[in-house]
Image (cartoon, rainbow, N blue to C red):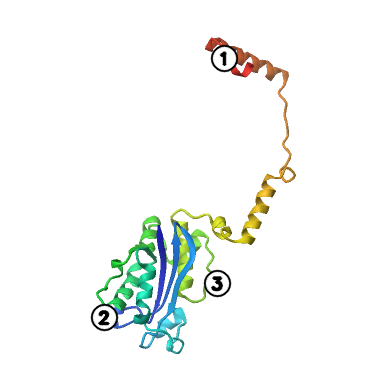
Amino acid sequence: MRQIVLDTETTGLEPSSGHRIIEIGCIEMINRKQTGNRFHVYLNPEREIDEGAVEVHGLSSDFLADKPKFRDVAFDFLDFVKGSELIIHNAPFDVGFINHELKQLEDSVTEITEYCQVLDTLAFARKKHPGQRNSLDALCKRYGIENGHRTLHGALLDAEILADVYLAMTGGQTTLSLELEGNDLGSAALESLMRSLTSADARPKLSVIMASEKEKEAHEACLAQIEKASGGPCLWNQ
């Protein structure tokens, strides 16, 4: 199962008002494990950015001036997400902007759902936690996911956080195995851990409590009853 955790940053709130995407961040997961394969790009929106949006993501027009246009990366983006399930928090927002950008292209593709499925984690969280706050920050707090390093929103950073939130909401993952696979240092750490768990010296010594004479007599009487009831020798007496 191939899933792409996706987030975007934009010039404003409404694509119908001409606002554009200025950052796309995607993280690939296969069978609920991050592969390390990512798609990340900043985009020149060819328009001014709302002041309120800059306060959220910190991306300025000057910074984006030399970045590619959406049309320059559109098909690389579509190739990356093709055939996957997109995991997006508040998907209608991001999907609306992506579709708006696709419609600007001289191509027949106008809907991202022509390329992939979409899962809205906000809608999922609202069903799982009705009546509670289900923003990404609220979900991080609920599931104990560290996001203190996020002072501003960023598409790739938010996608990383959302990947952790999604896995926690849908049953978690074996984080240890993810971190250790293909990692020599991690493998050595795991081997050391396993040695400590299986070493006789590392294990506490168990107390041995012998049966009393009275308990032995009761045990023998029980075995005799089993033999009588079964009409044959009791295995424990063999």
- Which residue does the numbered mark 2 point to in the structure image? 106
Q: Nearer the viewer, mark 3 or mark 2?
A: 2
12 over 94 or under it: above or below: below
- Which residue does the numbered mark 1 point to in the structure image? 226
Res. 210 image quadrant: top right
Residue at 49% over, 77% down: 152
- Give the residue type at disc 2: Glu
Residue 183 point in image, percent of width and height: 60, 61
Distance between mark 3 and mark 1 Cα atoms = 67 Å
Q: Residues within 10 Å of mark 2 (few under 14, many from 20)?
A: few
Residue 160 point in image, percent of width and height: 48, 67
Q: Secondary structure at mark 2?
A: loop
- Which residue does the numbered mark 3 point to in the structure image? 149
Residue 26 point in image, percent of width and height: 43, 70
Res. 14 image quadrant: bottom left
Q: Nearer the viewer, residue 180 or 152?
A: 180
